[in-house]
Image (spheres, helix red, strand yellow):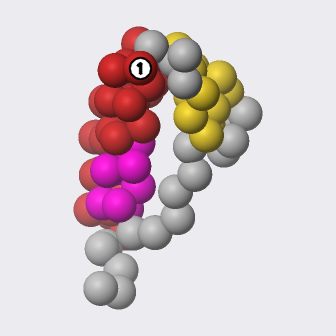
C-alpha cells in the first residue's frame, strides 16, 4: 500500500497534472492520498473522483483570471 502526500505549487496546468498523476498513482498502487489543502485522506477512487471533479473548476478559474505569466 502506498500513501501519497499531495503537494503542488505552480501554474494551474501543472496543478491539474499533479492532481491527475497522484490520482493515477494511488489507483495503480491501491493506496491513499493526503491533500493538505483540504486536510483530507482519500482512497484511490476518491482521489480519481476529486481530481476529475476539480479539473473543470480549475479550468474555469484560469479562464476567469487568465493564465498568468509564462
Q: Vertical placement of 56 versus 65: above or below?
A: above
Relative placement, left or right, of 40 versus 21 is right
x, y (%) of residue 66? 31, 73
Magenta stretch, main secondary structure, is helix
Place residue 51 in its image quadrant: top left
User: Residue 12 or 32: which is nearer the viewer?
Assistant: 32
Q: Is residue 46 visible?
A: no
State the residue at coordinates (32%, 50%): 17
Which residues make up the magenta segment?
A: 12-19
Residue at the farthest right position? 39
Does the rendering let one see residue 3? yes
* Image quadrant where residue 23 sits: top left
- Give the residue at x 44% y 25%: 26
* The C terminus sits in image quarter: bottom left
In terms of depth relative to the viewer, which is nearer, 10 or 62? 10
Residue 56 in the image, given as x and y percentages of width and height: 28, 40
Q: Which quarter of the figure has residue 24?
A: top left
- Residue 15 in magenta? yes
The residue carrying mark 1 is: 29
- Crowding around mark 1 (Cα neighbors within 10 Å: few <14, some 14 to 19, many 20+) is few
The total number of labels drawn is 1
Relative to 49, say whether 51 is above or below: below
Q: Position of residue 67 (x, y in %)?
A: 30, 74
The magenta stretch spans residue 1: no
Pick out the residue farthest to the bottom.
Answer: 69
Quadrant of the snapshot with the N terminus: top right
Q: Considering the numbered disc 1 on the image, is that residue within a helix, a strand or a loop? A: helix
Amino acid at each position: 500500500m502506498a500513501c501519497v502526500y499531495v503537494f503542488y505549487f505552480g501554474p494551474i496546468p501543472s496543478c491539474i497534472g499533479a492532481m491527475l498523476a497522484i490520482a493515477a498513482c494511488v489507483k495503480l498502487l491501491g493506496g491513499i492520498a493526503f491533500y493538505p489543502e483540504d486536510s483530507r485522506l482519500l482512497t484511490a477512487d476518491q482521489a480519481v473522483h476529486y481530481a476529475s471533479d476539480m479539473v473543470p473548476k480549475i479550468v474555469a478559474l484560469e479562464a476567469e483570471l487568465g493564465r498568468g505569466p509564462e
